[in-house]
Image (tube, helix red, strand yellow):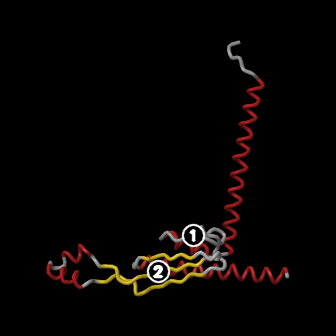
Amino acid sequence: MLFNRDPEKAAQKAEQKAQRKQQRQEAAAERAAQRDAVKAWRDAHPAEKTLNMAAMLKMWPSSTMGVTALGPVKGGSAEFVNAGAHKAWTATRLVAGVATMGASAAATGRKNKGAAVINVVFGNGAAQTYTVKPEPAYLKAANQYVTAFNALAAQLAEEDDTAGETSG
């Protein structure tokens, strides 16, 4: 005999390999089921899609089925405080621009003025404040985030109210 194989060991290895394959298949099926559940939930709660799209621009907490890393959306609220956040020319930059015939003004650009923040209170009482860059894309995203957060919180609270009425 050139190859002396133990048939019992070979059968054991084949069985272990089959078990690992089955576990991978079960895990893949479970992940697919979770993805489908999240997709169905987001179809019923479109504000979460908007919230997550706005959260991608800045590191604001995204939500999965109404729960963020900092706490649940339900019972929470968000407010957008835009204290005149905008880009503006400062006096020194204007003078420098005139003195150099616009070359330094073009090089230095405009300076950020004002401040904008998002104040978020989650359903578990955790509160967080996020600063927002005074640029149109960020200000728009911040407004969308706050609107979507509040809409999702209201929808989840309303669903709880209607579920409580039907079961009680």
| Residue 99 coordinates in the image, percent (x, y) | 14, 81
Dot 2 falls on a residue whose secondary structure is strand
Residue in front for this viewpoint, 29 or 161: 161
**Does residue 131 lie above or below 84 as drawn?**
above
Give the residue displayed 25% in from the left and 74% down from the top: 108
Looking at the image, residue 21 lies above or below residue 96: above
Judging depth in this view, the residue of 41 and 86 nearest the camera is: 86
- As drawn, the label of residue 62 is 1
* Percent coordinates x, y for residue 38 in the rendering: 67, 66
Cβ atoms under marks 2 and 1 closer than 8 Å? no
Tell me which residue sits at (62%, 79%) in the image.
Answer: 76
- Residue 26's x, y, as percent? 73, 50
Looking at the rendered image, the quarter that the C terminus falls into is bottom right
Image quadrant where residue 103 sits: bottom left
The furthest residue to the right:
168
Pointer 2 residue = 117
